[in-house]
Image: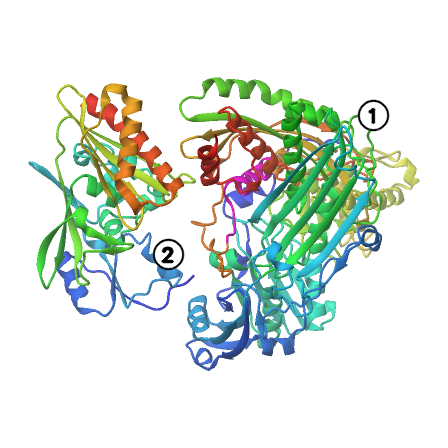
Amino acid sequence: MKPPPFAYVRPANVGEALGLLASVEDPRLLAGGQSLLPMMNMRLARAGTVVDLGDLHRLRRVLVHDSRVLVGAMCRHADLAGSAALARPLPILRQVVDHIGHPAIRNRGTLGGSLAHADPAAELPALMVLAGATLWAESLRSGRRAIPAEAFVRGHYLTALELDEMLTWIEIPQGRPHSGFGFHEYAPRAGDFAEVGAVVRVDAGDGHAPLRVRAVTIGIGDRPHVLSDDAPDASAGQRQWCAESARRLVGSLGTAVDDAIEARLLEVCLARALEHAAAGSEAS
Amino acid sequence: MGKFVGRPIERKEDARFLRGAGRYLADVVSPESLHVAFVRSPVAAARVAGIETAAARQAPGVVRVVTGSEFAELCGVIPMVYRPDPVFNECFGVEFVEPEIRALAVDRVRYVGEPLCAVVTEDRYLAEDAAELVDVTYEPVEPVLDTAGAVTDSTPSVYDHCPDNVAMRVSYALGTLPDDDAPGVVVVEDSYEIGRHSGVPLEGRGARAIYDGERGRVDLWTTTGMPHILRDVICRAAGWPAEALRVVAPDVGGSFGPKVNIYGEDAVLAVLARELGREVSWVEDRYEHLVSCAQSRDQRHRARLYADATGRIVGWKVGFDVDIGAYNFWVGGVVANTAIHLLGPYRIPACHVTGRAVYTNKTPTVQYRGAGRPEACFALERSLDRLAEVLGISRQEVRERNLLTGSDLPYAPGIPQRDGVPIVYDGADYRATFRACVDAVADEAQALRQASTGDLRIGVGYANFVEATGRGPFENARIRLDGDGAFTLWVGSAAAGQGHETSLAQVAADVLQTTPEAVRLRAGDTGTLEQGIGSFASRTAVVAGSAVHLAAGALLARATDAVARAAGAGREDVTLTEDGFRSADQPAPRSWQEVAAWFAAGGRFDGEPALEDEATFRPETVTWTMGTHAAVVSVDTGSGAVRVLRYFVANEEGRIINPLIVQGQIRGGVAQGIGGTLFEEFAYDADGQPQSTTLAHYLLPLATDVPRVEVVHTEEGPTDRNPLGVKGVGEGGTIPVYAAVASAVDDALRDGGGRAHVRRTPIRARDVLRTILDAP
């Protein structure tokens, strides 16, 4: 478990990083290294040049503008969990981050790294889709462009990024009032990758009744799936409507989930996440 | 009870281990050492049609590349380690087809991970780079991957000389089984399976070898629990005299069985060090560990339990298969243990057992903590639960009807032990131990049931076990009075974290009326003690402990003689007290320090050898530990996830040397048992590719998965089979966990009206959920 030889560079700023990305042979961006380095050690991944983004300190900031929050791609998971600015649009962020591996992983792994790695079992890509985030990618060749989170993941470990592009900022819109968020996942042990999970948002009306449910799956197929239920019926009581809505959401997935056990686990995760979210939407 | 034996003394070695001052294998590798990387087979079964090493030999830093065929000229076939006693073989109808094992595969590979070439370079990075350049041409053949398919006519053979893939057969027929349709006889029949897993220690394997040209000897440091046997095996394979190899076990970070084994890598390191005249080292990485360190369990049982209408067992019939992978140096031990321990702590008048060990194209196997006993316990305890359900009596009641009591014990079930000696359980009252555990769990279980909410269901399960511990053939100890009045103690069985530096020192300290601090243990070095066996099979406290007791007694006799000579008294007039030797000639006692000074330069006995003696203990046969485990679990009916919430252990064991160490053994054993019951499995795909090659896929139990384990009842049932009266406790913590947790899962699902019956471990949430969804 030693990597084959590779060159190593550590650019001082984004411009330098983009220059290297465009010029060196077979570059791999190191943005935390919690997936790339084990894969290199097992010789499952190879790099001509490892471009270590650890010095791009400007990308480790969280900036708040009126209606949006800009998160630097090099923000570590632990930074996200501790950010007051992010707690407002995404009150479940801390809970979600607490389910990413263990503290040592959260102290190294980054938001941009997780998104660009695009593991279908990862929590943050799903949460960014639910948040309606916009991902900003940059390259020397074509400058800066915006990619909706929903369109970013293209398959197992595949993203919309071009070979010479890197993620720089993730833009998260401010939440709307009367929205509650929920999260639930099933993993065999604490800290393991989820086998199945979901993040959900319940938008409530003035009378606190749920108007609309939006959910994003974790660990189903090759990417996060967006699910909606526009007519939840809350008259039967919270546990009941959450269970029924979860069943409809799973049904709307169609053949994307073909294993009965996986479908059942997803339904349970959705129902539990919805109960959590419903409590949040009533409180807000 | 002595002054120190029986006391909960904190472990002397922990100060070293916990402060990072332990010297593990990687710590003894010097900066000058060469490093070895092994080329390992990427396919489960293939003929090796060619191996091209030219590119590797020219790679940077490469010193030597050795292929299997080159190595075969330097070192022969590795001989088997263990064969059961002829009396046992006769009684159990043992048939054994030995494998042909080479340190590096020559013309055929038999599992993914099998080494077939060694690359020696300046460092491990370069070694892996060069190993990648070795170009092996494999001609894959159809792999043998399951025991059921392995022995049919149409399947391929792992070894040409063993066409049916059956490595070993055992069978015995004790008494007569009733006819199935005999009036009043109830029969329950089912199949049970324990998946493939093993002890995965914190420290992997490793070896470091240096050739001492002056002595003509290779010194091999390696992560082993049995240095003497390893020395003998390597010397036999390489054609060396025993003097040509010294094997040393440094601090070893966990063994659990897998490090009590013969590995080809050790032989390669020893031979290369001698050939190159330089230090060569190999420190296994976790990938190598998970594909090539020996695995275990992987048994399937077809079990039929016969009882009368009151639940009394009248017959027990089991056929079992053990998937031993490409080979198992201890195959006789695993198969015999399973066959013997199928009888459990119960009155079973008739028992017919047939067992087979089957070669497959998977990683070789070994004896792992329990070594066949967890599987036997699982089949019997699961069958008892099934019987209780069929008869409509409680799981406690069916056990109470059959457990051996004070009026049955000692009890001879009617078969011989592996050593050929007829088994006699030297226990006190197994039913009383069971009752103590059942009583302890009752209130807690009730409280947890009442507190459970939502989708959580609570269940309680029980399992009983017996364990043959402290087997021979022997262990040696040597002890010397040092110049400072303290003692150096040598034993052959190397430690891997069991606390021998404390427990064996307690034994010696009581005999010598000194303190455990004054007894320094040196274990696991063939250079300082000529013969020894090793730490496994719950035997060190019993066998090495007794040898220490005897050696300390012999040293005391010599010291008493010396004091008598000095005092001009008869030896019967000299007595040892806490303060030193007392004799009539002077009022002040003579301390050990004073006696030691007599043998130093200028001392009274200057020129005589230092006081030193040694002893060998050969147990006549094993001694039996018994215990009951009770698990309280929750099952999440939404996800199927099982959590062990509380755990209780009641043991009937012998005299206890150190209660802290015993409790640690039990708690650690339960943790490993929970791992095997809920998480751990070496999975293989349909081509024989291992699927559990990282610790993200081979799931070990975490602190969050293991509850507090309460040892509620420790009945002392001292044995007269060794001078200390001790019994082994190294494996009992693990043996019944599988059965106890499975029983608790059944119980939890019964609350929902279901009729679950767990037949296989690990118990996967997915399988539990399927049972829940399939329930009517």
- Callout 1: chain: B
Q: Quadrant of residue B344?
A: top right
Question: Which quarter of the image is occupied by the N terminus of chain A?
Answer: bottom left
Q: Which residues are magenta?
A: B667-683
Asked whether residue B21 is in view, the answer is yes
Vertical order, B146 against B707 (above or below): below
Nearest the viewer among B422 and B610 is B422
Residue nearer the viewer, A206 or B175: B175
Residue kind at label 1, given as amino acid type:
Ser
What's the residue at 42%, 78% (across, down)? Answer: B59
**Residue holding disc 1:** B407
Q: Does the rendering let one see residue B365?
A: no
Q: Secondary structure at mark 1?
A: loop
> Where does label 2 land, which residue?
A38
**Nearer the observer, B581 or A236:** A236
Q: Amino acid at mark 2?
A: Pro
Q: Which quadrant: the C terminus of chain A?
A: top left
- How far across and down, in percent of the image, does residue A131 sit? 18, 39
Q: Which mark is residue A50?
A: none
Q: Give the image quarter of residue B578.
A: top right
Residue at (46, 82) in percent of width and height:
B54
Q: Is residue A257 left or right of residue B324?
A: left
Q: Position of residue B662 (x, y in %)?
A: 65, 35
